[in-house]
Image (tube, grey):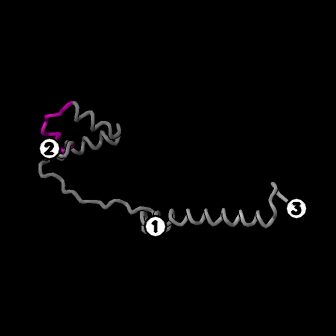
Amino acid sequence: MQFGGMQPSQMMALQQHTMNQMQQHQVPLQQQQQQQWGGPFSPPAPPAAVPVAPPADMELKNVIERIADYVTKNGPQFVDVVREKHPNDPKFAFLSGGEG
């Protein structure tokens, strides 16, 4: 019996060729994932936590804690608002990577 003008042996050969092509493309993808993930099914490692010592200045520590509370309530965009409203205030320099 013919299917689409092809003999069964031709259909089988086409299916085998298609499977081979799929496998050839799948192997590099798996290798790429293994290189990125460290294994075929390993998720990326979480970032390492870097301990940060609290500031010695208690007033600065209180400012940082208050900002952190506001960020948890209002979202990270709150930091941008503080930066915009107090660009030259040394009390908020820690928000821009400076010393507190």
Kind of residue indicated by mark 1:
Gln
Quadrant containing the N terminus in the rendered view = bottom right
- Which one is nearer the viewer's eye here, 10 or 75? 10
Q: Which residues are magenta?
A: 85-95
Tell me which numbered mark, 1 or 2, is placed earlier along the sequence.
Answer: 1
Q: Position of residue 96 (x, y in %)?
A: 20, 42
Q: Quadrant of residue 7?
A: bottom right
Mark 1–mark 2 contact, CB under 8 Å? no
**Camera-nearest label, 1 or 3:** 3
Q: Which residue type does callout 2 highlight?
A: Glu
Q: How far from the left and from the top, in percent, is residue 64?
A: 21, 44
- Provide the residue designation for mark 1: 34
Q: Secondary structure at mark 3?
A: loop
**Type of the residue with mark 3:** Met
Q: Residue at x 29, y 60 (%)?
A: 49
Name the front one of labels 3 and 2: 3
- In the image, farthest residue toward the right: 1
Going 21% across and 30% down the picture, which residue do you hit?
85
Whether residue 15 sits left or right of residue 54 in the image: it is right
Residue beneath disc 3: 1
Label 1 or label 3, whichever comes before in sequence order: 3
Give the Cα separation between the discs numbered 1 and 2: 49 Å
Spatial CA span between label 3 and label 2 = 87 Å
- Who's the residue at 12% across and 39% down the image? 90
Q: Is residue 28 magenta?
A: no
Label placed on residue 59? 2
Q: Would you say the residues marked 1 and 3 are in contact, meaning their CB atoms lie under 8 Å apart? A: no
